[in-house]
Amino acid sequence: MNDHYDVVIVGSGAGGGTLAHRLAPSGKRVLILERGDWLPREIENWDAEAVFVDNRYVSTDRWLDAKGRAFQPQVHYFVGGATKFYGAALYRLRERDFGELKHHGGISPAWPVGYDVFEPYYTQAEELYQVHGARGEDPTEPPASAPYPHPPVSHEPRIQRLFDDLTQIGLHPFHSPSGIMLDEAEPAFSPCIRCATCDGFPCMVHAKSDAEVVAVRPALQHDNVDLVRKAVVRRLETDTSGRTVTSVVADVDGEEHSFSGDIVVLSAGAANSARLLLASANDHHPHGLANGSDQVGRNYVFHNSRAFLAVSKERNDTRFQKTLGLNDYYFGDADFEFPMGNLQMVGKSSAPMYRGEKPIETKLAPTIALRDVAGHAVDFWLSVEDLPDPDNRVTLDGDGNIVLSYTPNNQEPMEQLYHRVKKHLSHLGMHPHHLIPRDVYMKNDIPVAGCAHQAGTVRFGNDPATSVLDTDCKTHELDNLYVVDTSFFPSIGAVNPALTAIANALRVGDHLLERLR
């Protein structure tokens, strides 16, 4: 198997899958190399114990932390990448996120291009990924050139009550921008059935706007697009000048194969794209491909996050819970001048997620029995920006395994945000002492193994001394090598990164179409 393509894309998630979709109508030969396979459609897709307790779909990879201790990262290798399991909360970064921001813990750097460059691609991304939302509710939302393509997902009664209560105390909750194929006006014709197994689960009926469903499958309808599954890319090889990638070497079903393309695009995720560049060192690039700046792998970010359930005094029979967001504290308030972050709902927790362990029982007794928690739980996610730190980085050990070194930073804003949320919830029909961290009752907690929002490591910028990519996401040091996953982020903001990765893939796709003419 040795064939030549116009473009070879490594990875089929939000970046790679979307890029393939953009390039497909051009007639250019496009190859997608995906480490995983199609995610099987099976009853376990919607089984909370299989997904969250047994980790049925989590990779068997073992990475190392800075002290050499092995851990299992919460990564998923399937066609569609991490989007197969995301909650489809598709936020734009705020306009100010593109500029330099002073945080409690330091500086979040400016991007080399402004929000104005991304705005038209955000609009296109929202159209492609069928985002539901309502402009004008969120006081921090950036300017938009078009309304959301679909109406907001309605709140179920308990969340509508929370929305109304937050509004009544002067806050500005909003309908979370959601990428699901839901038609509430014509439910008989709606692909989405508004189930309770969306956030963190794969969608058995293919009604979540993940990269496989909305990008890869349509791209494959074009004869010029090929997909090779179960292709584990090991390294990139260059010509004798070191300026051009000549081949992508991968193990396909255990056998080594080489693929070549006029243009090669990495979109394997912030950790794995950095790994590939580091593993591809040669005489011209002794410290890793495109790494003359020593920036490959550095500045890994993935959000300071806290997930918790609050125990509602009234029952919460919500099924699709991820409909509400709150950004009133995103850039701080009168009592804390620094940015805090975003509050949003997460998918409704269910009984199998509570493993009957003593910590949760101790927190609840005698107010409510453990068996009744699921009926009263309201589940929240707080997200705060962690700041780029060159020592938070991906490196390789002697055997080529990923070593992820990470020291948390900018943590005070999380405590400030949590304090505000807790104060409000205690007056809004929640038991004031029962905010229970998600890692108490679920197997997969959020520290370094929980890398769903990973970004950084291959940042773009104008200066080759301080960045790996130029503003078109081409490596400064190689003429035909690009990166379009979240590796390119100089900073991560405090909202979900998926829509920005999608928008950027469309932007880079337009650049590549011009180049390939």
Image: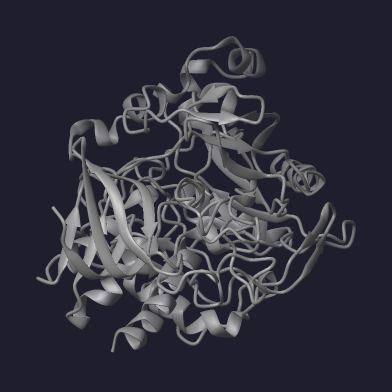
Q: List the single residue furthest toward the top.
A: 358
Q: Is residue 346 above or below residue 482?
A: above
- Hey, which quadrant is residue 445 in on the image? top right
Q: How many marks?
A: 0
Q: List the single residue furthest toward the left.
A: 223
Q: Position of residue 480 (x, y in %)?
A: 40, 72
Front-most of residues 360 and 208: 208
Front-most of residues 5 and 184: 5
Residue shown at 40% from the left, 52% from the top: 268
- Hey, which quadrant is residue 488 in on the image? bottom right
Q: Position of residue 412 (x, y in %)?
A: 82, 45
Q: Position of residue 334 (x, y in %)?
A: 88, 62
Is residue 209 visible in this depiction of the protein? Answer: no
Give the left or right position of residue 37, taking residue 55 as reference: left
Is residue 389 visible in this depiction of the protein? Answer: yes
Give the left or right position of residue 223, taking residue 512 as reference: left
Scheme by which the image is coloured: one colour
Q: Position of residue 479 (x, y in %)?
A: 44, 74
- Please state, as top left, top right, bottom left or bottom right, where the C terminus lies in the image: bottom left
Residue shown at 47% from the left, 55% from the top: 323
Front-most of residues 406 and 202: 406
Q: Is residue 386 above or below residue 49?
A: below
Give the left or right position of residue 440, taking residue 30 as reference: right
Q: Is residue 12 above or below residue 279?
A: below
